[in-house]
Amino acid sequence: MGGVISANAGEMIMNEAIQRFHRASDFLREKMSTPGDIKKNLQGANLERADLRGANLYEANLYDANLQRANLQKANLQEANLQRVDLKMANLYEANLYDANLLMADLVGANLIDANLVKANLRGAHLQGAHLDMANLEGANLSRSDLRRANLDQANLKGANLENADLQGANLRRAIYNNDTKLPGEFNPDEHYMRLNNTSSFGKRRKKKKLKKK
């Protein structure tokens, strides 16, 4: 009896996941088929737990959208408007967020491992416990962001602005910075085992190509 109940529960969970995927796919298909700039307007959309792996959301307007626990692995969010978006616990592994606007975005616990955040605006963003291992944050604006307990191991922080950011408990071991990096007032990078690198390139492994609109 217990086995039957367990199997039924598993089937229900699977069906729910499939339905979420189709709802998200249908929603995006409808938006992207609309002519003109309207197709990019996803402002306030509820895409919680949506499966958006590899989605092309170039320049999309996702202002104030709900993307909690959404799967955006390898999605293209270049130059997207993600102001005040809810991305708590979202999967943004290897996502392209080049020059994206994440002002005041909620990224608590989000997976941003190896993400491209070059020139991204993360001013005032909530990044407590976020996973930013090996993320490329070159030239990003992280001023006044909350990075408490965030993992920035091997992240590229060259030219990044972290003025007035809260780095309490953050892991910055092996994170790269240069003379253009703006760190909080009394912050000592040596005490956090950060690495100074003033070369013009960060290395081939770290380079992320700017994706263009298809």
Image (spheres, grey):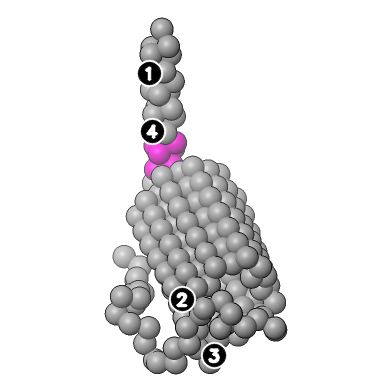
Helix, strand or loop status at disc 1: helix
- The amino acid at mark 1 is Ala
- Residue 165 position in % (x across, y down): 66, 73
User: Which badge, 1 or 3, comes first in the chain's sequence?
Assistant: 1
- The amino acid at mark 3 is Asp
Identify the mark at residue 148; answer none if there is no mark: none
Q: In the image shown, does 192 or 94 lie closer to the viewer?
A: 192
Q: Which residue is mark 4?
A: 18
User: Which badge, 2 or 1, comes first in the chain's sequence?
Assistant: 1
Nearer to us of marks 1 and 4 is: 1
Q: In the image shown, does 92 or 181 lie closer to the viewer?
A: 181
Q: Spatial distance from mark 4 to mark 3, Cα to Cα?
A: 47 Å
Helix, strand or loop status at disc 3: loop
Q: Are marks 2 and 1 in contact (CB under 8 Å)?
A: no
Residue at the outermost left position? 204
- Residue 119 position in % (x across, y down): 50, 77
User: Residue, x 47% and y 56% (percent of image)?
Assistant: 111
Identify the mark at residue 7; answer none if there is no mark: 1
Viewer can see residue 115: no
Quadrant assignment for the C terminus: bottom left
Q: Which residue is mark 3?
A: 180
Q: Is residue 127 magenta?
A: no
Question: What residue span does the magenta drawing correspond to?
Answer: 20-26
User: Which badge, 3 or 2, comes first in the chain's sequence?
Assistant: 2
Q: In the image shown, does 20 or 109 lie closer to the viewer?
A: 109
Q: Which residue is mark 2?
A: 174
- State whether the magenta stretch is mostly helix, strand or loop: helix
User: Residue, x 50% and y 73% (percent of image)?
Assistant: 173
Where 105 sits versus 34, above or below? Answer: below
Q: Is residue 23 left or right of residue 68?
A: left
Q: Spatial distance from mark 3 to mark 2, Cα to Cα?
A: 17 Å
